[in-house]
Image (cartoon, helix red, strand yellow):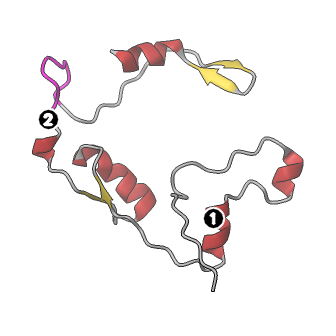
Amino acid sequence: AVQAVMVGDQCQLPATVLSQEAQKGGLDISMFDRLLSMGMEVQLLNEQYRMHPAIASFPSWRFYRGDLRSAVQESQRQLPRGLALNSHVALLHVEGREQSKGASKRNPEEAACAAW
């Protein structure tokens, strides 16, 4: 039997379809979502290595029903020295206006805050 191994994450980014005609045809549903709805067998890779566990806890809860685990300890993701914040998670309000050019968007004020 012919088999295929597909690697991806339907929880990451949704299909982007700008055409209303294509949306009506169902093309705004990703291939992974289609296959999952047809009963495709799934194996979740449930260990993440990039984020501090305090940051990873939100996507684990929101997108993976709490099944995503951190393979790193908090002690392995220390705050950089000299950082004005005393937390790995911060929500900052930035006064800025989003600018559009074609399908692209930008917000220079938010970019400057992120570069800080």
Q: Position of residue 5 (x, y in %)?
A: 54, 69
Q: Position of residue 93 (x, y in %)?
A: 41, 23
Left or right of residue 6: residue 16: right
Pick the front one: 60 or 48? 48
> In the image, what residue occupies the spot 42% across and 13% down?
112
> In the image, what residue occupies the spot 51% across and 56% down?
11
User: Does 82 lie within the magenta span?
Assistant: yes
Left or right of residue 6: residue 55: left
Q: Quadrant of residue 18?
A: top right
Residues shaded magenta:
79-86
Left or right of residue 92: residue 95: right
User: Does 28 lie within the magenta span?
Assistant: no
Q: Quadrant of residue 103?
A: top right
Q: Position of residue 98 (x, y in %)?
A: 60, 19
Amino acid at dot 1: Asp
Q: Quadrant of the C terminus?
A: top left
Pick the front one: 54 or 72? 72
Q: Which SS class for mark 1?
A: helix
- Which numbered dot is residue 78? 2
Residue at image mark 1: 33
> In the image, what residue occupies the spot 84% across and 43% down?
19
Label 2 or label 1, whichever comes before in sequence order: 1
Amino acid at dot 2: Gln
Disc 2 to disc 1, C-alpha distance: 36 Å
